[in-house]
Image: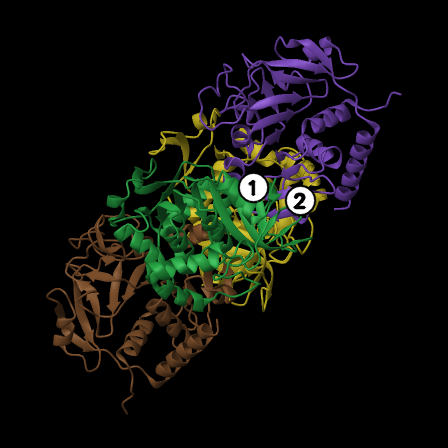
Chain colours: A brown, B purple, C green, D yellow
Amino acid sequence: MSLEYTSSEMMTVTAARALENGSTCFVGIGLPSEAANLARLTHAPDVVLIYESGTLQTKPNVLPLSIGDGELAETALTTVAVPEMFRYWLQGGKIDVGFLGTAQIDKYCNLNTTLIGDYREPKVRLPGGGGAPEIATNAGEVFITLKHSRRAFVDRVDFVTTLGFGRDGKGRDNVPNIGKGPTRVITDLCVMKPDPETKELVVVSLHPGVTREEVMDATGWEVRFADQLEATPEPSENELTILRELKERTERAHAGQ
Amino acid sequence: MSLEYTSSEMMTVTAARALENGSTCFVGIGLPSEAANLARLTHAPDVVLIYESGTLQTKPNVLPLSIGDGELAETALTTVAVPEMFRYWLQGGKIDVGFLGTAQIDKYCNLNTTLIGDYREPKVRLPGGGGAPEIATNAGEVFITLKHSRRAFVDRVDFVTTLGFGRDGKGRDNVPNIGKGPTRVITDLCVMKPDPETKELVVVSLHPGVTREEVMDATGWEVRFADQLEATPEPSENELTILRELKERTERAHAGQ
Amino acid sequence: MAEFLSLHDAVARYVEDGATVAMEGFTHLIPFAAGHEVIRQQKRDLTLIRMTPDIIYDQLIGAGCARKVIFSWGGNPGVGSLHRLRDAVEKGWPHKVEILEHSHAAMACAFEAGAAGLPLAVLRGYVGSELPSVNDQIKFIECPFTGERLAAVPSVRPDVSIVHAQRADRQGNVLVEGIVGVQKEAVLAARHSIVTVEEIVDDLDTHPNACVIPGWAISAIAVAEKGALPSYTHGYYGRSNRFYKEWDAIARDRDTFTRWIDENVHQTGENA
Amino acid sequence: MAEFLSLHDAVARYVEDGATVAMEGFTHLIPFAAGHEVIRQQKRDLTLIRMTPDIIYDQLIGAGCARKVIFSWGGNPGVGSLHRLRDAVEKGWPHKVEILEHSHAAMACAFEAGAAGLPLAVLRGYVGSELPSVNDQIKFIECPFTGERLAAVPSVRPDVSIVHAQRADRQGNVLVEGIVGVQKEAVLAARHSIVTVEEIVDDLDTHPNACVIPGWAISAIAVAEKGALPSYTHGYYGRSNRFYKEWDAIARDRDTFTRWIDENVHQTGENA
């Protein structure tokens, strides 16, 4: 039996599945938050979700619009001050997975959320680093999720806001007390992982119905595919139901405010 | 009309009077705590008492035996973690007066609470620095109260646990972001203040009935007296009553535990 | 000791042209009423510090109050860009605004260090990021024990910090509850501070380790009911996510923005 | 994820001979029951870290468990000396104990830095004190922004931290309330941690910003009713000031001390 689902849903479900039950996850707002909460509501009931607003072990019933929605504090185990969040919980090494989105990402998984163009004369000014620069280096590993497009997937980011593996893939070599960095990138087309040697992002799994050409067209460098390219498993009916209910609840809640 | 009172009571009342209403005081346990609470219960109802256990703006009904008695937390505005206490409240410059006791004090108002004798082969091991080294430098000014004796008032302390004005009286010169240091020492015999130039402790006021000879006998250096030596005012009946009630309440409370 | 002032008087007294101002509140408890008062009083050349500029700084920047913005994430949360911030940075409207940007971790540590009276904050940060190449206030030091290279940033020590909180008692002690952000740090780090509150009560009615800022650590307290809207006050009212979304269209256009400020800030007065 | 263990098993598993151990609790919530279990299991060569050694370390030192003590104030609060600590330092009984001493401010910052995963803590400390001349772990750095000389100490990162708290829920989340000291920092700074609690409950029943240590940040939880006596547990029982005073006579004499430990620790077992 074949289910109907959108490529966005495919992305979210795949991203959610990456998160192991029981792990502690520092959650970025937007797509990462959607995926992390879907994980919590499906296979990972004991995943610990932490938002940079200080909400520790939170279980929002609807997705937050902002990183500090009241829902996050109301359903948290406790809420700590923001300096404590970054010092004790992130830098203190308590986070297994940092889950991030980004505006731009390059071949070596560096992230740009600062600007397009030149720093002093930006074409487009983006929001900036936020928590990402230290999430990416202080968390045990990093998952990244974003929609696949040539605008987003570039050969070299305009600005390295947040370290993937550096301009040359060696940015984490010999750095003490640093996490593994990005271990997977989940898009609406595929899953990519850094090559164990070169750290170049490689497509390891194609989503159902997606062709290599589509991925190549949406990627700003000559993207490589793993020798053993896998097919991403489809979402289950249960996952789709729960995701859709979550999004409906969210929309209802936010429309009312 | 002449009141009966002990030299200890005279000391406590005089120390209490030093504390201005509305000031914030970081309180050491023992004599300083007794004096600070007497101040709060008499002329300084709005004095803010802070103990290093994290109890902020506390109003104990009985004197604490330890720096962290339950009474302190129960009557505090709020209680913060100890790192916050030392970082935000003391080092952050929120304390007007640090109120300290000591085992040894010298001519330049340096305090020793570490040991008598040589550090590696101590004759007597004392408790150590505790909060004093940073209270003495980070508070706006410092009051010291202790009983007068040759054992306590020495020419040179065996060990500078806590800076008064250094071995040569110049220990605070040109040090940035440092408090005024000790501005008065209140004993059971007299009040002493550092000479504005040399920083040597000078007797500025004798308690009623105390002679210069008694002070000289109890001081381990050739102590100087101010040109305009004053007579410390006697305790009032009200102060004595309140002090005695406080000590009675305290004894009753501690005996019951 | 905190003085109880009207919001007008508190802003008039403590926010001077050219001052360095931190208005904090991490999504929660953003001091919008105070921000509007700063706009009404046409303060100029402010250096605005804030981890997440949010709509409040978009309004101040668009209204011409800012000379410089120090921040770590400048967006309309969950919605998109801050159009007034972008217009100022990209096109210099209403005038050029300088920016100095950090990461959240660095700014959070810098507020903490400011509250702690230190000149610098030390963190394991900025590794591999290019932010240090565009922010000369980010330096690196070597740990004298391990040799590890660590980032250092100057502490945040504003001339005045402005925060919003649930309530104050009659002695001026303030309760902050829920997402407390860096509000306490902002107040303690600043030379002066203004706290707006929903209400003044006889008894704060708190638990033993509540986040309470004592009155003697605050310069002025002003009652500003619903003073955090469109952000929210835990226990009082929710966030107007709708307004955050609507702001996108308002702020996108210079004229629409100016009209909105005229109608909703200038023409209303303090109790709007 | 915190495992629920008996106190015996928790100590047996996590406290190894030669380990660096922090038993914290600032006057309040001192983990006496756990300390006694360490004595019963005759752990040896421990490096004991604690801001205020107090009676608990006097007992461990006298019982021969300690090789080194790192502290900032070693006394019987409000009573006098720790005679066992003094006897070990001054006369080497039952064997020589090394000491490394700090100020409270430095140790509090060192715990904070340990929890924050940093190798060092920076503070405005030790100015004019001679402690740096007898503690080679105190260094000074220069602020790269202001040139100010600041003290630096290594962060505290124990092999195992042991603290006592009011209660845990069934997921192992722990509430600490009242004088919270450096307990949370001790747990977060350590490689392993044991938390003893008065009771296990279905619901911690806390307020939004309570000091709660999540179960996944703790190694083991053991129920130890009255586990902080003669210190106290806010909301459960008071401090036995009387015992603190009585301890002076017990600890003054080696034989009296040894007899007391035999009768009150060795012969009693975990549930004494």
Q: How many marks?
A: 2
Residue nearest the viewer, comparing C240 with D258:
C240
Up the image or down, B45 lies above or below B227; here it is below
Asked if residue B117 can be seen in this view, the reply is yes
Q: Quadrant of the C terminus of chain C?
A: bottom right
**Coordinates of residue B20 in the picture (x, y in percent):** 67, 30
Up the image or down, D93 lies above or below A141; here it is above
Up the image or down, B190 lies above or below C26; here it is above
Q: Quadrant of the N terminus of chain C?
A: top right
Q: Secondary structure at mark 1?
A: loop
Q: Quadrant of residue C242?
A: bottom left
Q: Chain of mark 1?
A: C
Q: Quadrant of residue B202?
A: top right
Residue nearest the viewer, comparing A213 with A226:
A213
**Coordinates of residue B5 in the picture (x, y in percent):** 82, 24
Residue nearest the viewer, comparing B28 with D169:
B28
Q: Residue pushed farthest bottom?
A: A1
Q: Report whether B185 appears left or right of A90.
A: right
Circle 2 crowding by C-alpha within 10 Å: few under 14, some 14–19, many from 20: many
**Coordinates of residue A125 in the picture (x, y in percent):** 27, 56
Disc 2: which residue:
B72
Q: Amino acid at mark 2?
A: Leu
Residue nearest the viewer, comparing D171 with C81:
C81
Between the C-alphas of marks 2 and 1, the distance is 26 Å
Is there a contact, CB below 8 Å, between mark 2 and mark 1? no
Q: Secondary structure at mark 2?
A: helix
Q: Residue pushed farthest right?
A: B1
Q: Amino acid at mark 1?
A: Ser
In this rendering, which labeled residue sits more in front, label 2 or label 1?
1
Asked if residue A129 can be seen in this view, the reply is no
Q: Chain of mark 2?
A: B
Disc 1: which residue:
C219
